[in-house]
Structure formats: structure tokens, C-alpha cells
Amino acid sequence: MNTIPLQWIIVAGVVIVALLALAAWFLSRKKRQSGRLQQRFGAEYGRAVGKLGGRVKAESELKAREKRVDHLTITALAPAEAARFSQAWNALQGRFVDNPKGVVVQADQLVRDLMLKRGYPMGDFESRAADISVDHPAVVENYRAAQAIAARDARGEADTEELRKAVVHYRVLFDEMLEVGEAKAEVPSAKQMAVHA
């Protein structure tokens, strides 16, 4: 009778236990990664899963977005720049009653200008929305809603109330993107200090 030596049985058992532990670690890691992506992207995670047809493809896309945005130089605005953008927005809103269609176009352009000033690349709409979703997932849906209304308006299908909603959606994104950096306190030079001494 041909029997397997005890030490081979022990080695096989250790290998099986090691493989099971490795599989458990891998599944745990994937679950943590999924949870992290769901936490970071919020509703955008579900949108990506629906659009791409599954969790694996969606998570791959969301990780690619993170990697792409990590390579961008996104900066906060200087206080003077933020004030200029705020004034432009306030002027834009004041023109809505007289020219709602024009204001929607201007709101879109002002948001694009703000994004560009902050360091976001200006590709097509889906690329811009994907980039925004990394750091501003809560408001990217506002951007999508505003763009959808603007597209309906371009086809002559949007009424004034929808245009008002588009401006409100743009405003939510605008407010989120209007991040102001700390004003740098001027450090007096030794020469300036000597003059005041």
C-alpha cells in the first residue's frame, strides 16, 4: 500500500492554510478599497458603477481619476482673485432677469474660467466632471444637471425656470470651487525693521 508521508500532509496543510489566509487578506483589501472609494466619491461611485456596468470597472475608473488628479497642480485662489470671481458672479446673477439664456452660457464660462485658474485641465465636459469628482464629489452632480439644462436650452427645449435651476446648480459648484488660499503675511526685511526702529 502506497501511503503519503506525514510531513507531506503537514506541508500541504500549511500551503492550504497560507492560500486561504492570502485569499482572505486579498478580499479584505478589496473590500476596504471599495469602501474607501464609496466614501470618497459618494453618489458618483454609484453613477460610475451604473454607467460602466459593474463595480470592478467603476473602481478602476475612479482610481484612474484619482491618479490623474494627483498629478495636477490644483491651487487655491489668492484673496484678490476670489473677490474678482465673486464680483463677476454677482454681476452675472443681476443680469438673469433680462437675459436668462445668456446668463446660463456666462455661468458655464465663469465656472470654466474658475476651474482653469485653480489648475483643472479644460478637456471635454466628461473629463472636467470626472476631475472635479475627485475633490468635489458632492457637487459634481450639480455640474452635470446644469450642463444637461444648458444642452436642452441649446436645442430650444428649456424654459426660464429650468434656466434658473441651471444657474443655481452652477452657483453650488462655483461656491465649492471658490477656495481661497491663506493670505501670505508679509515678513518685514531687516532693512524695513531698521527703518521703523
Image (cartoon, rainbow, N blue to C red):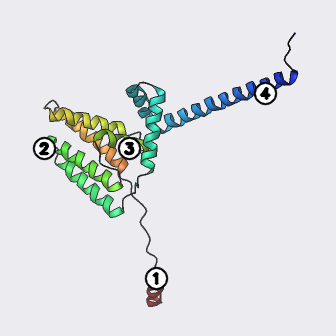
Q: Earlier in the sequence, mark 1 or mark 2?
A: 2
Residue type (three-letter) at the residue carrying disc 2:
Asn
Residue type (three-letter) at the residue carrying disc 4:
Val
Circle 1 or circle 2, nearest the eye: 1
The residue that mark 4 highlights is 14
Circle 3 or circle 1, nearest the eye: 3
Q: Earlier in the sequence, mark 4 or mark 1?
A: 4
The residue that mark 3 highlights is 131
Q: Position of 74 compared to 24: left or right? A: left
Circle 3 or circle 4, nearest the eye: 4
Q: Position of residue 83 (x, y in %)?
A: 30, 60
Circle 4 or circle 1, nearest the eye: 4
The residue that mark 2 highlights is 99
Marks 4 and 2, how far apart at CA: 75 Å
Circle 3 or circle 2, nearest the eye: 3
The residue that mark 1 highlights is 189
Q: Is residue 3 above or below residue 60?
A: above
Residue type (three-letter) at the residue carrying disc 3:
Asp
Marks 3 and 1, how far apart at CA: 41 Å
Q: Earlier in the sequence, mark 3 or mark 2?
A: 2
Marks 4 and 1, how far apart at CA: 69 Å
Circle 4 or circle 2, nearest the eye: 4
Residue type (three-letter) at the residue carrying disc 1:
Ser
Which residue is at a point 29% across and 34% down the rendered structure image?
Answer: 145
**What SS does tag 4 mark?**
helix
Q: Quadrant of residue 141?
A: top left
Q: Position of 128 compared to 186: left or right? A: left
Which residue is at a point 20% across and 50% down the rendered structure image?
Answer: 92
